[in-house]
Amino acid sequence: MFFKKLVSEPRPSIERSSSNGASGSPALQTFSGGAGQATEHSAASTSHSSDVGLGLVLDALGGVLTALSRYPIDLPDRPGEQSAEEIGRWQRHATLGYALDEGSGSRSVGVNDRDWGGVVRAVTEQRRDEHKYVESSITELREALWACVETVHNAVKIDRTADSSTDAQTERAKDALKRMQTGSIKQEVLGAVLAIEGALQTRRDQQQEQYVSLATKLDRMGKQLEDAQKDSTTDPLTGIGNRKLFDMMAPRAVQMFALGRQPVVLLMIDLDKLKLVNDMYGHQAGDQAIANLGGALAKVFLRQSDVLCRYGGDEFAVILHNTDWKMAQTLARRLQEQVATMPAPHPAMEFSIGASVGVAQLEAHEEVAEWIARSDKALYRAKQNGRDRVCVADGLLLRTA
């Protein structure tokens, strides 16, 4: 025990003498004989109990400091060994009474004279620096992963353009070869062209397999790292994501779709009659209606991969991975049912409010702006058709509920 070494060393001067210079404990100098002997025995028992309690506290503190020094983290400006040595120095000072300047020749420092504030500051600074470093490392890793996805996505687009050009040239070569009169040359060159086509197709198949594998791994890692930015991407009124989160996740959804070709759907949702609520019952009631819709979204879209955002004002956006437009349409209707059960945002309100929804499944080679525009157009059509409707964007089988 750390305490064993403490009591084996000479006591500090403040513990060896009283303020008037008398030796021993003042309690032991006051009385003698009879009742004084009983008082002396009681004081000795109390002192022993205090020493034991202090020893337990110092042992626990020593264990904590030892654990911190045993598992240090290498920081950019300080190696782990240096951090361990510094914490170890404070551990010896706090539990054994070693002077902070161990080369000064002083053997022991009394408990009351030890720098307890310095112990707290040293541990706090060490943990703060480690926390900043880990948080920064996670952020950098996340950005590096998504930069990798974006690079591969751009490479896919470039490769697709090159393949289109190669296909066109191949078709022209076939037409030219068919008009040739020399059969042997025609046959050989045509065979070469066919071989090129086969090689291109094999390359495309291999790349697609690699992209799907990469997309699966990155999707799994991305889900574990997204929590790092929750605070800055949360809408304070509704508790779901804000526009910043949507602007970050929509391009990633497009990139992941280009790699894995798993269906992904965008829902644009607008709260009906919000202006009427604001005009008749005030903006506080309008804010309550918006908050209620955020709660309804959280009850319907439960998967960790679902991205729920307040797009702006009373408009919301939902990105659903691995979901086609049919399932999204069903979920949108379920959302409308949930909205219908929401409590009124004002006790005097005599009409109900609903939600209009536009659904757009991402199509091949479509960019984020085009995807949003199609979903917005479907939302506008739902509003025009009487509100509280679900409309699917053009480009897919259109259904209106």
Image (cartoon, rainbow, N blue to C red):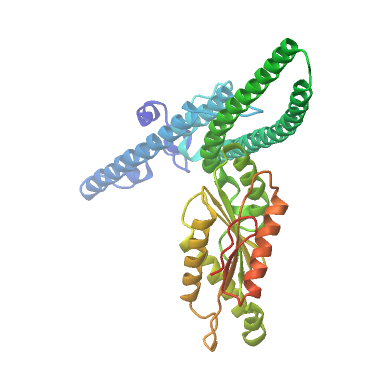
At x 29%, y 47%, the residue is: 31
Above-or-below relation of 340 to 232? below
As drawn, the residue found furthest toward the left would be 34
Query: 96 and 39: which one is in front?
Result: 96
Q: Position of residue 340 (x, y in %)?
A: 49, 75
At x 38%, y 44%, the residue is: 26
Q: Is residue 377 left or right of residue 236?
A: right
Q: Position of residue 275 (x, y in %)?
A: 67, 79
Query: 284 and 222: which one is in front?
Result: 222
Q: Position of residue 180 (x, y in %)?
A: 79, 18
Residue 51 appears in the figure? yes
As drawn, the residue found furthest toward the top would be 184
Name the quarter where the N terminus is drawn.
Answer: top left
Numbered label tally: 0
Q: Is residue 38 left or right of residue 177?
A: left
Residue 115 appears in the figure? no
At x 63%, y 48%, the residue is: 363
At x 50%, y 67%, the residue is: 333
Q: Position of residue 343 (x, y in %)?
A: 48, 78
Above-or-below relation of 1 to 192? below
Q: Please tell me in which quadrant of the rendered image residue 239 appears.
A: bottom right
Query: 25 and 262: which one is in front?
Result: 262
Q: Please tell me in which quadrant of the rendered image residue 355 appears.
A: bottom right
Q: Please tell me in which quadrant of the rendered image residue 4 appears.
A: top left
